[in-house]
Amino acid sequence: MSIAKVIVDVPAKQTDRPFDYLIPEHLEEVIQPGMRVIVPFGPRKVQGFVESVEETSSFKSLKKVIEPMDVVPVLNEELLLLGDWLSKTTLCYKISAYQAMLPPALKAKYERKLKLVSENANFMLPDGLEQLFARESSVLWEEAIKFASIHAIQKLVKEGIAEVHYEVQSKGKKKTTKHIIPLMSAEEMLIYAESLTKQASKQKQVIEFFIHNREPIEQRQLLERLSISSSAVRGLVERQVLAEKNLEIYRDPYEQRQFAKTEPLPLTGEQSTAIAPIHASIRNDKHEVFLLYGVTGSGKTEVYLQSIQNVLEKGEEAIVLVPEIALTPQMVNRFKGRFGDQVAVLHSGLSVGEKYDEWRKIQRKEVKVVVGARSAVFAPFENLGIIIIDEEHEMTYKQEENPRYHAREAAIERGKIHNCPVVLGSATPALESFARAQKGVYTLLSLPSRMNNRPLPEVEIVDMREELKEGNRSMFSRVLLEKLKDRMEKQEQTVLFLNKRGHSSFVMCRDCGYVVKCPHCDISLTYHRYTNQMKCHYCGYEDQTPLQCPECNSEHIRYFGTGTQKVEEELTKVIPEAKVIRMDVDTTSRKGSHEKLLKEFQDGNADILLGTQMIAKGLDFPRITLVGVLSADTMLHLPDFRSSEKTFQLLTQVSGRAGRHELAGEVIFQTYTPEHYSIELASLQDYDRFYQSEMMIRRNHSYPPYYYITLITVSHEELMKTVAVTEQITKVVRHKLSPKTVVLGPVASPISRIKNRYRYQCLIKYKQEPNLKEVLKSILDHYQGEISSNGLQISIDVNPYILM
């Protein structure tokens, strides 16, 4: 008797533990830990994950597992352990942790199919299956198990003869294309070719091809290769020399692209010094966290590539994480160019089907390297040799919904399990990471100078208050305008960076000061010019822009702030001959548009690239010699203790786009607070001094890295209810934690209402608080009933990155 311990897909406190199910006799050899199964739960059938298989259970009269959903486990042993760690550290349910590790296709509605992938002469198919497969290369799972036992099917999969596929309903299916397959042996084909007349020369050509190539080939490729029409093939299919068959092919988002093979570059002295300890760690199977701190353009990517090369030569695998917005074609080029087909790419720009196909390549061990955004940290490798996190300071590595994990922490946890190095790279490391490197928790590796000793670009800070005094009301300072025109004459390129999207930040009446706000959220609406609409970027509410003030009926209603669309308009007024490419959320929302726009800029079809956050990093174009930052202080005024750090990082990154090659670069920061240390030190690219200044402020105000923080946010449709629950929670936290711990609140969140729900929060700052997790879990347990029945929401973020 075997017992499966199953975590069921019912996210609630009462069900957040394994349930015992009896494994039916015919499935005993089949069910393994990490598989998804269908089990009875109360009156319904639900999906669950098998955590382990045991011999005994302490419960009598167990229900039986209905059937497995997988033939091979979707989570390996290590990922099951990681799920456990994830649920404990982020206080989420285990089922949420397991699902976070899988591609979206495995979370949707699905239709399961069994598919024949090769015919092995030494292996007999069960009779019924043979008849099924004679008609079709893939059959519904429900049909297949009528004719063969699951055990027999599992054997077919193990032998590589069949595969199980999940055809995702309404989320994209497997991609199939028409393939041509030889039905006759090479000898029979020779005889058949001799019987053909002279006029059938095209058919002879096809037969000739299949005498030497016995593998199925896509019809499109065959016609291209032999320069023939489909009629020649059709004739041979009719005479049963060849057969047509729809076979599945991987959806390859990069199939239209040729990647030029690149060879390792000779390393500089600094790079050799930095890479040596990483190589030693790989060689000795030793887990160590390295912080690779190198200025922009210092050659960090080459260090990554050669470290991965080292890992691959050892027969191991590598994960490379890059921020979502930096997954530019350039980054993919570098890895595909060096490692070719051994690379899978995972990011949000791919369709559900493409993501699933890339994930399957990893699971089937067809690739050795994964390049991807945050969730790629869960790639199902079993023999990891290195994990690299590029731009490790980026906020996108933190997931803002359950499970609220940080990819850096998940990577370090996997590094410990696999005894392999984790490399964190950045020109502007997160303060927490740099502090750990200073303390010796991480090993610091430095690349202090740019490749070929190129100088860092000259940065000029322009005080926009002075510009206003001098009568310049435009969004471009005189010096920036002058330099823009100069670059146009020299035929060099410029990047203009704006720290937000949309046309104008808000719509305001100049007579009475009324600002148009979202009726459901406590935030002003953003104006979008192309649709002449106002949108809420929190709940999606949209409205037409009013022609007069709803409060005082004045017609002096104007748009305030600066958005990318507005800058583009202004540019065409002041430099009409300039070709501008605008990159923001609106222009890059269509698939492939991000890549297309960058390619246009790279090919020199535009003079100015204007964009938001997404152009701040990863770009490396030789003709960019000027970078203009239009509003350097936008982020400084956010109610967030990390705002100075984020400003410094962003400005340093964006400055690093200029003068990376032969031509010298210049940068201009336009700001209303030129005296702020984060702007001043970003202009000097002086991270060390910034680190000293910022650490002093953090120490004085008890913020990370001196203290850990946890944020509890309570939301409900009734204001009084929200306040009462937050007060109660704050009281419990104060009472149960040590007196040294600082508890702030209850207080309204900076955005106090979203989607008609009021939001209050409580912030906990602590140095050591061993029973914090227990206290927080007990709070969630206490309010469990109200959470499920009364619309109450309590979210707990351990180490939050956004306090809004």
Image (cartoon, helix red, strand yellow):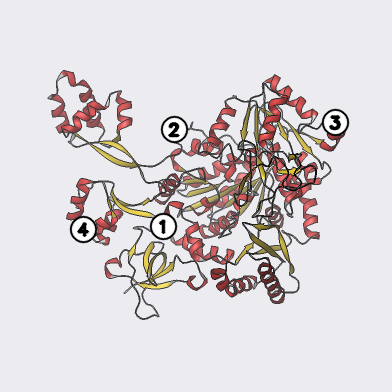
The residues tagged by marks 2 and 4 sit, at their Cα atoms, a distance apart of 41 Å
Tag 4–tag 3 contact (CB < 8 Å): no
Mark 1 vs mark 3, foreground winner is: 3
Give the mark, 3 or 2, whose residue is nearer the N terminus: 2
Alpha carbon distance from label 1 to label 3: 65 Å
**Which mark is first along the chain, 4 or 2?**
4
Based on the displayed image, in which of its 4 quarters is residue 441 positioned? bottom right
Q: Is residue 659 visible?
A: no
The secondary element bearing badge 2 is classed as loop
Sequence-wise first label, 1 or 3:
1
According to the picture, the residue beneath numbered tag 4 turns out to be: 147
> In the rendered image, which quarter is residue 193 located in?
top left
Of 38 and 256, nearer the camera is 38
Labels 4, 1: front one? 4
Q: Earlier in the sequence, mark 4 or mark 3?
A: 4
Q: CA distance from mark 3 to mark 2?
A: 52 Å
Specify few, some or many for label 2: CA neighbours under 10 Å numbering under 14, 14-19, or 20 or more: few
In depth, the one of 659 and 288 nearer the eye is 659
Residue named by callout 1:
74
Residue under pointer 3: 471
Q: Residue furthest right?
A: 469
Asked if residue 651 is positioned above or below residue 538 in the image, the reply reads: above
Residue 671 percent across, percent down from the top left: 79, 39
